[in-house]
């Protein structure tokens, strides 16, 4: 059992170490953090959506934006698109593939940012939301895995974790979210 534990910890560490040494990935984190900061400065809202564990990552990001990460500061405008009554209503009456698209059409504007999270990069409901966001002039940050799928191609900034293991991809996604929050509270000086 100890060898399995050690192997999992090592595998997780290896993926992150490789990305830490990838200038393009590090640059994409900086660029995406800048998009989030610009949105906040312009009075916009950062929206986030995902499925399954990625839903939880989107919600975690939002609670840290609205609440705080490490430092006492003002709340930052952020909202996840996971209202259960809207999701079940729209999915039942229309289609689950369009549930986030509907949210985007109602709430997003050119001052906002949409963070779409999909470990495959090909979740239909995320892609439909991104397509709607692009039509509105909303900036899009994609958190994806594997080869990035369609999400990487459609995003203004894409952060692609080159792994086929969902758990490794999700571990990097939550780390990226924590880096964004750290940068907002320190480097960008939001208080």
Image (cartoon, rainbow, N blue to C red):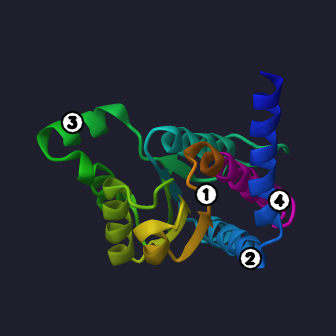
Question: Badge 1 is on which residue?
Answer: 163
First in sequence: mark 3 or mark 4?
Answer: 4
Q: Residue 155: x percent and y percent?
A: 48, 73
Q: Is residue 58 magenta?
A: no
Magenta region: 171-191
Residue drawn where x is 29% and y is 38% of the image: 86
Q: Is residue 8 above or below residue 150?
A: above
Is label 2 or label 1 in front? 1
- How dense is the environment of label 2, judged by Cα within 10 Å: few (below 14), some, or many (20 and up)? few
* Numbered disc 1: secondary structure: loop
Q: Residue at x 68, y 75 (%)?
A: 31
What x and y, as percent, mark residue 143? Answer: 56, 60
Q: Secondary structure at mark 2?
A: helix
Q: Which residue is mark 4?
A: 17
| Mark with earlier residue (3, 2) | 2
Residue under numbered circle 2: 27
Q: Judge left or right: residue 32 versus residue 30.
A: left
- Which label's residue is closer to the chain start, 4 or 2? 4
């Amino acid at each position: 059992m100890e060898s399995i534990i050690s192997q999992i910890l090592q595998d997780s560490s290896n993926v992150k170490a490789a990305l830490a040494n990838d200038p393009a990935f590090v640059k994409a984190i900086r660029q995406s953090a800048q998009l989030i900061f610009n949105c906040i400065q312009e009075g916009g809202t950062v929206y986030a959506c995902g499925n399954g564990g990625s839903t939880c990552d989107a919600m975690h990001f939002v609670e840290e934006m609205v609440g705080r990460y490490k430092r006492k500061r003002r709340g930052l405008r952020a909202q996840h698109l996971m209202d259960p009554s809207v999701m079940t209503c729209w999915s039942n009456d229309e289609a689950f593939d369009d549930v986030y698209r509907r949210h985007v059409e109602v709430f997003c504007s050119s001052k906002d940012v949409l963070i779409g999270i999909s470990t495959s990069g090909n979740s239909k409901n995320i892609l439909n939301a991104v397509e709607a966001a692009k039509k509105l002039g909303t900036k899009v940050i994609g958190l994806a895995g594997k080869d990035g799928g369609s999400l990487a191609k459609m995003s203004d900034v894409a952060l692609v974790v080159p792994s086929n293991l969902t758990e490794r991809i999700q571990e990097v996604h939550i780390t990226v979210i924590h880096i964004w929050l750290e940068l907002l509270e320190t480097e960008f000086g939001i208080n």
